[in-house]
Image: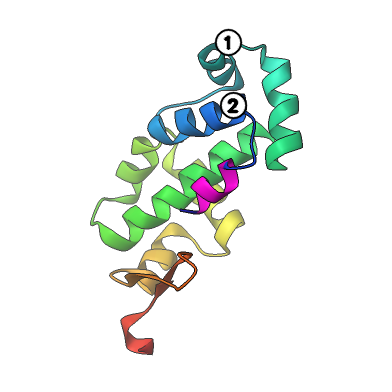
Amino acid sequence: MQIIKQSAGLSRPMTECLNYIYSHIKERITVKDLAEYTSNSASYISRLFKEEVGVSTSDYIRNAKLEASKNLLRFSDYSLADIANYFSFTSQSHFSQLFLKETGLTPKKYREKYYGTQWKGTANDIMTYTDESQE
């Protein structure tokens, strides 16, 4: 839902880029891929991405992959290596380093802390996770 709200004020190329990113989230995605998909130059897409979304293309893609990996850590029994491979990180070690930098927890600690927590929607349709034990 947040993606839909964000994309409401974005240009068509940016909306197309976001759609491409989320529909190819498990693949390695480059600015060149986005440029080809939207029939624009890579430099144009890079500049437009920074202007409209507020972060670089690579940062956005990395964060989208990390957010998606959080769901697999919470709701699946896939190994860390499988999750790293699924989202096309260069290695499990690289995935773990990026995850730790982003969340402050290693993927293993994150899974231990949040495994099996519920996904709940608030009145504003902003999705949050709460631990069942806190209810």
* Residue 103 position within the rendered picture, expressed as x and y whole percent measured from the top left: 56, 61
Query: Which residue bears the numbered disc 2?
Result: 12
Q: Residue at x 35, y 50 (%)?
A: 80
In the displayed structure, does residue 40 sit left or right of residue 33?
A: right
The reply to whether residue 83 is in sight is yes
Mark on residue 39? 1
Residue 95 seen by the camera: no
Q: Amino acid at mark 2?
A: Arg
Image: 122 above or below 125 = below
The relative height of residue 12 versus residue 75 in the rendered view (above or below) is above
Snapshot quadrant of residue 107: bottom left
> Dot 1: what SS?
loop
The 10 Å Cα crowd at callout 2, few under 14, some 14 to 19, many 20 or more, is few
Write down the region rendered in magenta: 2-7
Q: Nearer the viewer, residue 31 or 93?
A: 31
* Label 2: which secondary element: helix
The amino acid pointed to by label 1 is Ser
Where, by quadrant of the figure, is residue 23 drawn? top left
Residue at x 58% of width, y 64% of height: 104
x and y percentages locating residue 60 in the rendered image: 60, 40
Disc nearer the start of the sequence (1/2): 2
Q: Is residue 77 left or right of residue 101?
A: left
Q: Are marks 1 and 2 in contact (CB under 8 Å)?
A: no
Is 72 a magenta residue?
no
